Amino acid sequence: MTIYLNDAEAKLIGLDEIIAQCRCRCPQGNRLKTNRHFYGPADKKPLQQEFDAIEALMALLKASPQEVIAAQRLLSQLRELRGSLHGLESERLLDETEFFELKRAISIFNQLAERKQLLEAAKVCLTVLEEAQNLLDPAGSGAQGFHIYSAYSAKLSELRKEKLELEIQLEAQSGEARQHLLKKRNLCCAKEDEEEERVRRELGIRLLHWLPELRANLEACGQLDFRLARAELALKWQARKPETVDTGEPAELTAAWHPMVQASLKKSGAAFTPHSLQIKKGSTIITGANMGGKSIALQTCFLSLALTQLAYFPPCEALKTPLYDFLSFSAGESGNFNLGLSSFGMEAIRIRDDFRRSQQKRGLVVMDEPCRGTNPNEATAIVQALCQAYGASQSSLLIATHYKVLPGRGLHFYRIKGIRQTDMDKLRTATVLQDSELIRQIQALMDFELEEVDGSQHTPSAAIQIAELLGMDPNLIQTMQALWQEEKWQK
Amino acid sequence: MRAYVTNEAEVNVDGLTSESQFLQLARLEGLSSLALVGLSKNSGKTTTLNHLIRAWQQAGTPRPLALTSIGRDGEEEDVVSGQPKPRLYVYSGTYLATARSSLNRCDALLDILALSGIRTNFGEVAICKVLSSGYVELAGPSQASDLLECERLLREQDSSGFFVVDGSLSRRAQAGGGLTQGLILAVGAVTSANPEDLAETTAHALSLLSVPALEATTSEYVQNLLVSEPCLRVIALPQANDSPAKMLSLPSLVGQAKAIAGLLDGKLKTLMLRGALTDSICKSLLAEKHFQDLTLAVEDGTRLFISPGMLRKLLQKGIQLAALYPLSVRLICLNPFKADGSPADRTALLKALRSISSIPVEDFGPTLI
C-alpha cells in the first residue's frame, strides 16, 4: 500500500515541496512527517481520527492561537532522545548532557499535560511524570539546568566542600605548600568523579522505571506536533476536511487547486482555475487542446488524493474519496541513459507494473499522455486498450491523452473547455506582440475548466491554430491545414 | 615553555607587569566582546586568557565572563612539541560555551543550561554556568555564524556578560568577523627571539588587524546588503553613486580570483571581499589592469593573511585596505619563552615591541595556578 512515483514525477507534482510546507517543531513530529504513512482501505478509522484531530486543532488555532504558539514553543525544545532512551534501556552510563535532555523533556511533558484543551483537540494523551521531574530537580527549584547535584549523595557533598576549602587555601599559598594543596585537590577531584559516576549510574537505573511512559510521551508529542502542523497548513489553504467513502464509490473533487501552481500564477498576475471532477471505477479520460492544462489538472487531482491518503487536508473546496490500495502517477518516461533503456521501454515497464497491480488491488493509476513519442496509430491502439481494460477493472485510471478513445463500458470522459473560436479570431486580429506576451494572451483566453462529455465528440485540437497565432510561416500553416482536413476526411 | 607556575615568587619577578593592572591597561570597560588572538602557535594565548580571568575575578567585576573558543584549546600538552600547556582556570559565575566531550575534561562543577544545536568535532556545544571554580577545556565552534549563535545563547543567560572568544591554535583564525569589538594580541618569542624580527612581524600583524573602518555610508550599505543576502562573497561598488553594485555569491574566495576579476572595470570605488584574503588572491587581482586606486575591504583585520611584500605591492597600486568592522587592539601580551622553554631577552623584546605602536605591550608572566 503506497504511492508509486519516481523522483522526477514527485518533483513535477510538487508533493515534496508541499509536504515541506508542513512545519513540524520537534524531531518526533518531523519523523512522522518524513515516514509518510499511507492510509489504505483498512485504515479508515485511524485516518478519520487524524482528520477529526486536525479539524479540532484548526478550530483551536482560530480561537486560541496563543495557546498553540506556547505549545509549539515547548515542542520546539524537544530533542531527539532515542539514543538516551536506548542507553537507559541497555543500562549504559548516561552523561550529564543526556540527563539534562531528559530533564528538559520531562518538564516539557508536564507543562504540555496541563494544556487539556489542546490535548483533547489533538486526541493525544500525556502522562505526567512528577516523580521523575523531582528526581532530576532534587531541590525542587524548577531550574532548567542540570548537574550532578550534591543532594544526590552525602559523600559528594562532603567532597565538594573539601574541594572548595582547598581552593580557598590555594589562593593564599605558594611554593611547596601550594604544590601539596594542588595534589590534594587532584585527589579530591578524582574521588568526586568517581562518586558522580556512581550517582549517574543510580540515576539511570531509577529513571528506567519510567521508560515506557517516556517513550509513549515522546510518541504523543510527535503526534501532537504533526497534527498541529497539518492543521496550520489546512488553515493556510482554507482546506476542508475530506470525506472517505466506501470502496468502489467514485472519488469526487470539488474546486481542487494546486498550491504551487497557484502561487506561481499569482506572481504573474493570473489566477488558477480550480478543477472539479469525479473519478469512477474504470477509466476517466481527459482530452483538450494544447496549452489547455491537462497535465496540471491531473497533477492537481493526484496531489489532493495523495495528500488525503497521507492524512493531510487536501487543497480542495470538498473531497470525497474511497481509500485506494495504491496510487500511481506516471508522466511518461524519458528513458534512463545510464541503464541504456529507451523511453518507451521504461514507459512500457511502468504501464505493465501498474496494470498488474490494478488487477490484484484497487488502485488509482494516473497517466499523463502515455505513448506520446510512439507511432500515433499504435499509440491510439495502446491507449484504447488500456482504457478498456481499466474500464472493466475494480481500479480507476485517470488519463490525459490526445489520442482518440472510443466510448465504451466503464469509460468516462472530461475535456478542458479551451479557447472559443471567437476569442481565437480576436487574437488573430490583434497587433503584433512579443512571443511571451502572445503566449500569455493565449493562456488568458484559455478556459481551463473541466467539463464532462460523453466521449462521442472529436478530440479537440487547436495545435495548428496556436502555431498560426504564434506566427508560423503562412505557407507552412496552409499545408498543415490541408493535410489535417484530409486526415479528418479520411477518418 | 613555562606557561604556568605554582610558586608565587616566580610570578613576582622584576620586569613583569602585575596581573592587577591587566584590566586597566586593556581598557575593557566599554566593550561587550573581546577576541584573543595569537601571533603564532604557543604565543601565550591561554596564559593571557588566564590572566584576564584572574584579573576579572580579583577586580570583583559584576559582569560575568562568557567564554568560548574557536575550535578546541586548552590541551594539557602541546601536540607538536610535547611541552606542557597551560590549563584554563575559571571561577564560579563564569559562563561557557563548550563541546560535550570537553565537559568530561573539566573539573569545575558545571550546570548545563542549554544545548546549542551547534555540532563540532568534539560534540554539540553546550552552554554552562560554572558553579564551583576549577579547570575547564574550551572547544567552541569554528564557523563565525555559530560563534554568533553561542553569543546569543550566552546572553540569554546573562545579557550583561563579557563575551570572550579564544582564537584557535591555527594562527589568527577568524576571531573577528564582526563578532567582537576588542582584541588582545598574544606575541611570543616562539615566533622569533630576535627583538627586531619579532617587532617587525608584530608591526605587520598590527597593521592588518588595525585596518581602518570602511567609509560610513559605504559600510552601512554593505552591511545591509549582507543582512539581506548572507551568501554574498564579493561586492563591487562603483564610483558613481547611481550605478548599481555588482555582486557574487560564492561558497568561498578560494580559487575565485578570475570570477572576482570579472567585476573589475576601472570604475570601482570599493571591492568588498568576504572571507580570508590571501597572497594568492591578491597576486591574481594585481595582474588585472583595472585593479588599482580603489578600497579593498574585508570584514575585519583578522581576515587578512597577506605578507608584508604583498601589502607593499597593494599600496603601490593605490589599493587602500579597510574593514567593515574595525577592531580595536587593546593590548599586546608578550610571552618571552622560546619553543624549547628557554627564556629570551624579555627587556629587549618589550623595548622593541613598545617602539612600534602606542598600544600597551606587557609581560604578565606565567599564570599562577
Image: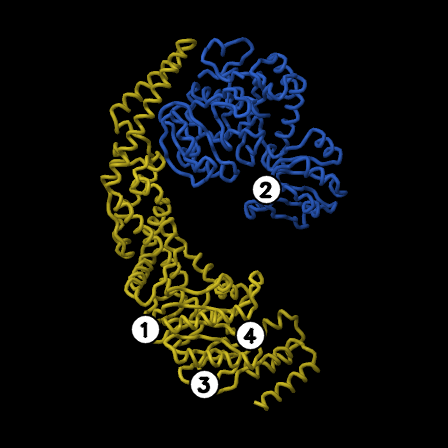
Q: Is mark 3 on a helix, strand or loop?
A: loop
Q: Where is residue B187 in the image (x, y as percent from the top left)?
A: 59, 22
- The lab-note entry on whether marks 4 and 2 share a chain reads no
* Number of the label disc, if any, that sits on residue A247: 1
Residue A473 falls left or right of residue B111: right
Please give the chain letter of the residue carrying mark 1. Answer: A
Asked if both marks, 3 and 1, belong to the same chain, the answer given is yes
Q: Mark 1: give few (<14), some (14-19) or many (20+) Cα within 10 Å.
A: some
**Chain A in the picture: what colour?**
yellow
Above or below B134: residue A204: below
Say the numbered circle drawn on residue A407: 3
Asked if badges 4 and 1 are on one and the same chain, I answer yes
Q: Is residue A273 in view?
A: no
Extreme residue toward the right, this view: B289
The answer to whether B72 is drawn above or below residue A215 in the figure is above
Which one is in front in this view, the residue at disc 3 or the one at disc 2? 3
Eye-nearest disc, 4 or 2: 4
Colouring of the image: by chain
Q: Which chain carries label 2?
A: B
Residue B316 in percent (x, y) is at 75, 33
Q: Do the residues labelled 4 and 2 touch (CB within 8 Å)?
A: no
**Helix, strand or loop at disc 2?**
helix
Q: Residue at x 67, y 18 (%)?
A: B196
